Amino acid sequence: MTCEEANVLLHALIDNELDAGHAREVEAHVATCAACAAKLKTYGDMRTALAGANLRHATPAGLRMRINASLPARAPRKADRRMLLRGFAAGSAATAALAASGAFLFVQSGHEARLLSEIAAAHVRSLQADHLTDVASTNQHTVKPWFNGRLDLAPPVVDLTTQGFTLLGGRLDYIGGRPVAALVYRRRQHVINLFVAEGSAQTLRPRTEISQGFNILRWSDRGLDLFAISDLNADELREFGEKFAAAEKASS
């Protein structure tokens, strides 16, 4: 494991978000790397300090009174206790289902936000560290086999050079503490990172999201989740997704 790979996983190690295999890899690297060990200690000290700090702030009584006074008065309501209980009993199942659905959506929304943020962070890292590719090639038959033995999936790789999107190569990256394939394309001066990860068997139509100022086109197909991210405008990124999917389908 390199320092670059370890740095991506240090926070996940502290928060116990890594599986046993990746945790052992990071710990083994930290044991032999003074620089990463120092970073891990700094992150750990920061986490401890934040956990022990009193960050709660109580609203001043005067402010609370002014807010309450500014709210419109509400007419008191009277309800028959028996009718209230009957209504509660009749709607309990629906209410429970709605609450469960709301909780699921909240958790799902939080997970989605973190996922998109990590994808944006990985994209920025690849540009700043000048480490776009581990295997640099415009030949899809060179890039695709490079992932053999490095991932448990075979990412689809297509050459779209003649369609305006040049294949630059690929690399191994980490999203959510898991290794993923990153396929790199260029559109004029714009870099597109296409992250490919294991997903569900469900097929999801492409949709565009925005995270940290980048457009992210995401879709799922044949057990894979795909995320294309770039500073390209949304229309051109969708064009990339359409051409990639069409070429991948034609080659399979």
Image: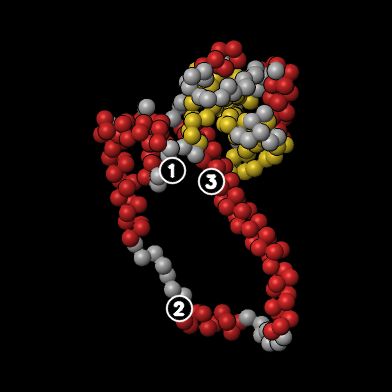
Q: Which quadrant is the C terminus positioned in?
A: top right
User: Quadrant location of residue 82?
Assistant: bottom right
Q: Which quadrant is the N terminus positioned in?
A: top left
**Which disc is residue 6 wearing?**
none
Q: Amino acid at mark 2?
A: Pro
Query: Please, what secondary structure does the residue beneath circle 1 have?
Result: loop
130, 55: nearer the viewer = 55
**Which disc is residue 17 wearing?**
1
Q: Where is residue 124 drawn, in percent x and y?
A: 50, 35
Nearer mark to the viewer, of 2 and 1: 1
Q: Would you say 206 lies left or right of 63 here?
A: right
Residue 102 against residue 153 in the figure, above or below? below
**Disc on the earlier residue, 2 or 1:** 1
Q: Amino acid at mark 1?
A: Glu
Q: Would you say 231 lies left or right of 49 here?
A: right
Q: At 54% across and 82% down in the image, what residue appears?
A: 66
Q: CA distance from mark 3 to mark 2?
A: 33 Å
Nearer mark to the viewer, of 1 and 3: 1
132, 13: nearer the viewer = 13
Q: Where is residue 168 drawn, in percent x and y?
A: 56, 19
Q: CA distance from mark 2 to mark 1?
A: 38 Å
Q: At 74% across and 18% down in the image, what residue appears?
A: 250
Nearer mark to the viewer, of 3 and 2: 3
Q: At 73% across and 77% down in the image, what residue appears?
A: 86
Asked whether the viewer can see residue 226, the reply is no
Q: Which residue is mark 2?
A: 60
